[in-house]
Amino acid sequence: MTEVRKGRTAKRAASRAVKRRALAIAADGALILYFLFALFPVVWMVILSLKPANELFSTYFSFTPTLDSYRTVLGAGEDEGVPFVRFFVNSLVVSLGAVGLSLVIGLPAAYAAARWRFRGSENLMFTLLSFRFAPELTVIIPLFVLYQQLGLFDTYVGMIWVLQLVTLPLIVWIMRSYFADLSPELEQAALLDGYTRKQAFFRVALPLVKPGIAAVSLLAFIFAWNNFVFPLILTSSEAQTVTVGALSFLGGDRPKYNLTAAAALVSVIPPLLLALTIQRYLVRGLSFGAVKS
Amino acid sequence: MDSSTEADHGAASSDDAAVAGAPEKASAAGPGPGAESEPGAGPGSGAPPPGLGAARSVPRWRRTLRPYLLIVPALLLTGGILYPFGLGLYYTVFDFAASKPQPDPVGLENYRRIFTDSSFWDSAWVTVLYAVGAAAVETVLGVAVALLLHRSTLVGRVLEKVLILPLMIAPVIAAIIWKLMLQPSVGVVNHLLRPFGLGGVQWTDTPTGALLSSIAVDVWVYTPFVAILALAGLRSLPTSPFEAAAVDGGSWWFTFRKLTMPMLWPYVLVAVIFRFMDSLKVFDIIYALTEGGPGDSTVVLQIRAYLEAIRFQRYSFGLSYMIVLWAVVYLAAMVLVRYLGRIQNRAAEVPK
């Protein structure tokens, strides 16, 4: 009797193990399926950017690779009349400028909002948060008119100014959460040691949140870099950035897919490289400090 | 919410310009922590502690003003952004356009025109379809990916490293990439589908196809966003309830429905709110993928405003669209954030 029962339990346990194993394989399979969907477009861009122009529409996966597209996009080959290198430099300048300005202005505000409670601070925080969710065109259409009157249309200053809409709320909200996590007792000890308030901020608080500053700056840089609607409307050529510039190869009488692919890839390299360096801090950054990990 | 912020709230009411430190901390550690520790500044400490010279004492008005001084630059900048917004609001009661540089006040005529115009309601409908569709698919797919990654098998650990990739690609670039892939005749998607007898799908050339394709691009870019937040949530959940459920022999579905989802929901909800609000104001993806076409089938509200204000240069009329969208987004945000607050409070009560 017991022998039979034992045998049956063992058999049941074995079949359960097989089932679990099958489920585990299915789960990994599902994951791989999702990542094929997520990664294939990037792989396809690489393929497209390496294709010679004459094989663009006649081949899919087997072709003779060439770097001509990159040469053209980077201004070393055939001239297509698209100054992509300048767009790239513009993106660098306006994104760095926007992050720099936001840091200088946002860090003191974030610190004040974390350390003191006073009239105006919550209002400022929520106004900034509402910028994050406001439809961009609500501000850009008036700016489009205003910038033309002020001579800021198609300038670095104009772009850096409007990008504050992207970078400032991010930096203030996230840095406030970092400052709030910091025990005030550290600064207080410094003050008792004879530091001034300013020294306590610069020598004690700021160094402790340095990783946070680095992460949020990179994230703000990425968002500024990836922005499209501001440069689309507020620049025309001088201060135009890569996101708008990448579209210009699609215009004209024959669409230049290989050049578009090369331009797209070149323009995603900086944000991708930066993103890989701040993986650990992304959760807090992406959720505006609402989720910490 | 961390303790110091909560302490803030406690201390705030009595003394407006002080103090981050909680009162009890202040008494234990001398002058109020984040507050001024220039002698005598902490709430409750009457006289400067001996030994710290009066030389460093800072006049009271400066202490009171300090936080305000720190946020002045941010306030100015914020003002600089609010000004064009106010200006935009002001424009909407005029008939300002490139063809009419000396505008006349028209009252609420722009809004009346919008609300009686069927193209507004069409745009609003497409916008809602897009936002709900994108946010729903991203939530389900994102949570699923997070659950699968949370098992941390070898495959999962390798793939997790590249999870972020689509999210860091500018949405407009993502749309360009997909546009090239979805070309009906030469695009690679139809080429890959040909063996399955689906070689000639007109992805972005039919109204439904264009909307679904745009949503698909949104899903491609933003599913990692939901997945990353959900995964962070999963990793921060307490393990003991799951161990208990395993001992009791609860099925996977039971555990998921009764334990995982209720505890994970606050995290996922943050992601859903971000995604829903952002896709209400979608612009880049549709601009690059379909430009609102074919016909008007994917003209969401921001695209409509762009066409009216920038392409046809009817500034006032285009702005009226944006003010309406802004109001909708604002209301949606208020409702959702209030709901989030309730959910987070409830989650905080769950014993860990």
Image (cartoon, coloured by chain):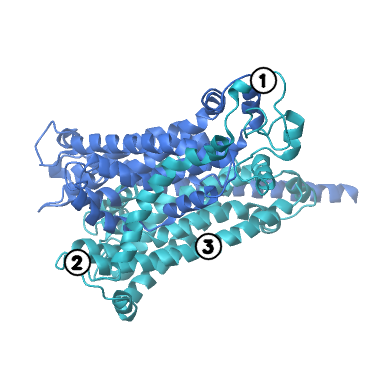
Q: Are circles 3 and 2 on residues that touch, CB within 8 Å?
A: no
From the top left corner, tell me how far across and down residue B207 is, in percent. 30, 70
Q: Of B161 and A106, which appears nearest the observer?
A: A106
| Colour assignment, chain A | blue
Q: Pointer 2: what residue? A: B97
Q: Pointer 3: what residue? A: B334
| Residue A188, quarter of the rendered image | top right
| Residue B126, quarter of the rendered image | bottom left
- Residue A3 visible at all: yes
Q: Could you tell me which residue is drawn at 70 percent across and 49 percent down?
A: A16
Q: Of B7 and A234, which appears nearest the observer?
A: B7
Q: Do labels 1 and 3 share a chain?
A: yes
From the top left corner, tell me how far across and down residue A265 is, in percent. 28, 39
Horizontal arrangement in the rendering, residue B179 relative to residue B237 (left or right): left
Q: How far apart are marks 2 and 1 (CA)?
A: 66 Å
| Colour assignment, chain B | cyan
Quarter of the N terminus of chain B within the rendering: top right
Q: Pointer 1: what residue? A: B52
